[in-house]
Amino acid sequence: MEKSEQNLPINGLTNKEFLVTAFEAIKYLGWRIRFISDAGVIAYTQNSEYSWNGEITVKLGQDSANVQCTSISAVITDFGQSERAVSQYIAAFEKMKSAFTDEEIRQKYKVYKKDFVPPYEDTLKPDIRPKYNFSGGFLSFFKPREGYYITPILINLNILIFLVMVCTGVSVFEPNGQSMVGWGANATVATLNGQWWRLISNCFIHFGIIHLLMNMYALFFVGLLLEPFLGKAKFLVAYLLTGIIASLASLWWHDNTVSAGASGAIFGLYGVFLALLSTNHVERSMRNGLLANIGIFVIYNLVYGSFKGGIDNAAHLGGLLSGVLIGYSLMPSLQKPDSVRIKRLTLISVPVIAIIFSVITYNVLSKSDRLTYQKRIVEFYDMENTALGVLKESNDKSEQVLRSGLRKGIGYWKRSINLITELDHLTLSEKLHTRNKKLIRYCQLRLQSYQLIDQNINLDSGTDIPQIQQINKQIKSTIDELSSQ
């Protein structure tokens, strides 16, 4: 393959003037431009299919530019064609140097700049994308390295916390809600009652090993691709901020929730990636394939979550949408990576805005009627347990003790009805209003049952009276309806 090159003095031209002249020289010669950037131009000589052709590379340097021509024809020798093409280009460049006014240079540069390739696609510049090396086997996936630094740290931290949880007695496969709340799960009453740190802590704990493995695989995949584009600081900021907003979305959507897992933050990272893929910041050869893969992942998981119980789609959507917004917010610093001012401004402004939004949302939720309801509904459950308990404690006791227990129970059921009626006047979701009506119906049935037993104690028939048996069937049916909600 024949190659010829020569240095072209810039002679006091600004980068803008040089680039416009370099591009216009290619057009003047009638050659075909492959792509342009702020580093130069790559083009092809426009000869016929069966004659010699060369690839022209003009690369801007500090004080001069390098002009290179490489033969791309299937010939043993090009008989000096590459050298002539370089000379031809330099002659055209010298001719174009004085062809435009300063205003024409400015206008032409604006037009050309729209077609500049993103940094990662610019073959005129050194390839700054990290080269992954997982030759160390399975364990190498957990070792931080350049371009893949925060991702393995997050994966290791999630795994370590899970192992510590298991060592303290938490179930490996199906942890209960109480143990998860103890480890920092996002729980409506606890989180909104001043324990705001649960908005973050829940992003690092999981409901069993399957939940953990699925999330860590998704984190590995998106981190491997996204972290090189964002860098360590932006990647970590995106994970934490979208995780917090995903947790808030879960609290906002659900009347009462106990949720945990890294999936909200992971969906946030996928949202950031989708934002980047909708711009030209990611090279074209990667963009379509990644968009398809990530789009399928997001859509499948959202659809799957909408049909399967126990999956917090509110957190997924909250993370995804906040990720898209954060992704676009980070674009100025990604498009101008050499600008320290823009980088600092982005790393300060994006977290500050997200945190202010989170604080406002948290305060609104912590003062909502929904939280008041969830706090006071505990009173109902306490009275219910007490009312049921007094009857059980009175079994096999004297008639007087039984009657005393029943009348205490009757008092608790009446107070329960009054409490639920009061709570139903709060601003709540339609689902909670419907539930309240069923709870009142349940209490009324319990009240009728206790009153009938009290009235028939002297008959020594206990609960065998047909009317009481019918009420008990209605109670069971109502309990089933409440359990299915």
Image (cartoon, helix red, strand yellow):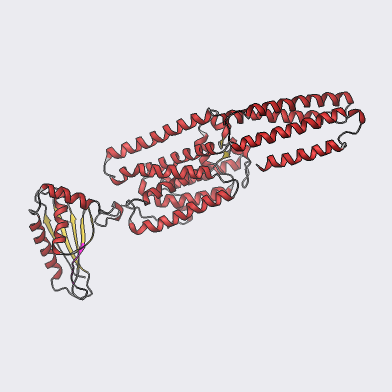
Residue at 9% across / 49% down in the picture? 101
Q: Is residue 70 above or below residue 156?
A: below
State the image coordinates of residue 395 (x, y, percent, origin top left): 85, 31
Q: Quadrant of the C terminus?
A: top right
Q: Quadrant of the N terminus?
A: bottom left
Q: Quadrant of residue 438?
A: top right
Residue at 40% across / 52% down in the picture? 225
Residue 280 among those drawn in magenta: no
Relative horizontal placement of residue 82, taking residue 276 as reference (left or right): left
Q: Observer-nearest residue: 238 or 9?
A: 238
Res 146 seen here: no
Residue 45 among those drawn in magenta: yes
Residue at 40% across / 50% down in the picture? 274
Q: Main secondary structure of the magenta part?
A: loop
Magenta residues (range):
43-47
Relative horizontal placement of residue 320, taking residue 428 as reference (left or right): left
Q: Quadrant of residue 352?
A: top left
Relative horizontal placement of residue 9, taking residue 238 as reference (left or right): left
Residue at 83% across / 38% down in the picture? 469
Q: Is residue 465 above or below residue 297?
A: above
The residue at the far right in this view is: 459
State the image coordinates of residue 368 (x, y, percent, origin top left): 54, 29
Q: How many marks?
A: 0
Q: Is residue 178 above or below residue 288?
A: above
Relative horizontal placement of residue 389, taking residue 346 as reference (left or right): right
Q: Observer-nearest residue: 78 or 30?
A: 30
State the image coordinates of residue 451 (x, y, percent, origin top left): 82, 28
State the image coordinates of residue 167 (x, y, percent, origin top left): 60, 42
Res 443 seen here: yes
